[in-house]
Amino acid sequence: MPAMRKVKQFTLDVGDRKVRGTFSRPETNGDDDRCAAILMCDGLATPSPFTDELFEHLADALHRAGIATLTFGPCGQESNGQATERLAVESIDAASAVFRWLALQEKIDLRRIGVLGFSLGSIVAACLTKRTDQIARLCLLAPTTPDDVLAHISSNGDGESAPLLGVEQANEHYFADLKNLTPPQDAALHDRPTLILHGAADRAVPAEISYEYSRAIELADHHVQHTLIALADHFFTQQPGRGVCLNHITRFFESMGQNSALAKTS
């Protein structure tokens, strides 16, 4: 059964846009305890049922471990259902504003705030980590890069991978300035434990793409763990891949605040 949680909806003004967020705090912590929290970024222009399901399972696993979660997305959409924000500008600004909102919550332990980015959201999460050193841990799940996304756009959304990424649902402005972003280097700027997970059978983002992040972090001589999950697809839809994914992420964020550092990969 899903873990019991307290849910709070909120809306923030970010420039001339509005961002809607959902903050979920596990009831198991009690009203007087400060808990760890994870900001979860999907980076999508429009909602995806596959991502929503994965995030729901992730949130439930984290709540069972006593960790709060926060998800967010744009409020406004065009008449055709497409989102109006740009990944390179508004999505990262929105993540920054939501992170500040999360850090101000009185029931949250400021020493134990992590960020998780999935797929397109890995770009948002990695770029966010450049803006603050208050992020205790970073997890990149099936991460993509600007070059990989632009390759999907240049192919006009042909093939199987573009729909999985959500590229074909974005309007012409959504990926503006994407080429100017350097998320692998941004993720390596501050030394924080970083976990990178990728499905070995991912057909949306090839597993080798995620090594751009681990290489950049290793070159900076910072802490990173990179793990491929056998037979897992982009959304980790099947067992045992999903269970392995959830276990890795839960253990990684549970250890926030502990003195032991994440071992470097060789």
Image (cartoon, rainbow, N blue to C red):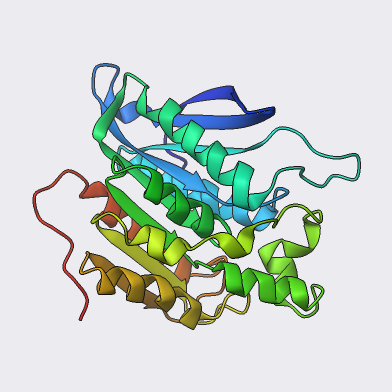
Q: Position of residue 44 (x, y in %)?
A: 65, 52
Outermost residue on the left side: it is: 259
In the picture, residue 99 is in which quadrant? top left
In the picture, residue 187 is in which quadrant? bottom left
Q: Position of residue 161 (x, y in %)?
A: 69, 75
Outermost residue on the right side: it is: 79
Q: Is residue 188 above or below residue 132?
A: below
Q: How many marks?
A: 0
Residue 129 or 1: which is nearer the viewer? 129
- Whether residue 153 sits left or right of residue 8 in the image: it is right
Residue 246 visible from this viewpoint: no
Residue 116 visible from this viewpoint: yes
In the picture, residue 234 is in which quadrant? bottom right
Residue 245 or 99: which is nearer the viewer? 99
Point 25% across, 26% down: residue: 34
Residue 111 or 189: which is nearer the viewer? 189
Q: Position of residue 140 (x, y in %)?
A: 42, 61
Q: Position of residue 33 (x, y in %)?
A: 23, 23
Q: In which quadrant will I find the C terminus? A: bottom left
Q: Is residue 78 above or below residue 189?
A: above
Q: Is residue 105 above or below residue 114?
A: above
Point 67% across, 71% down: residue: 150
- Whether residue 75 sits left or right of residue 158 in the image: it is left
- Whether residue 170 sits left or right of residue 199 in the image: it is right
Point 68% across, 48% down: residue: 86
Point 91% across, 39% down: residue: 79
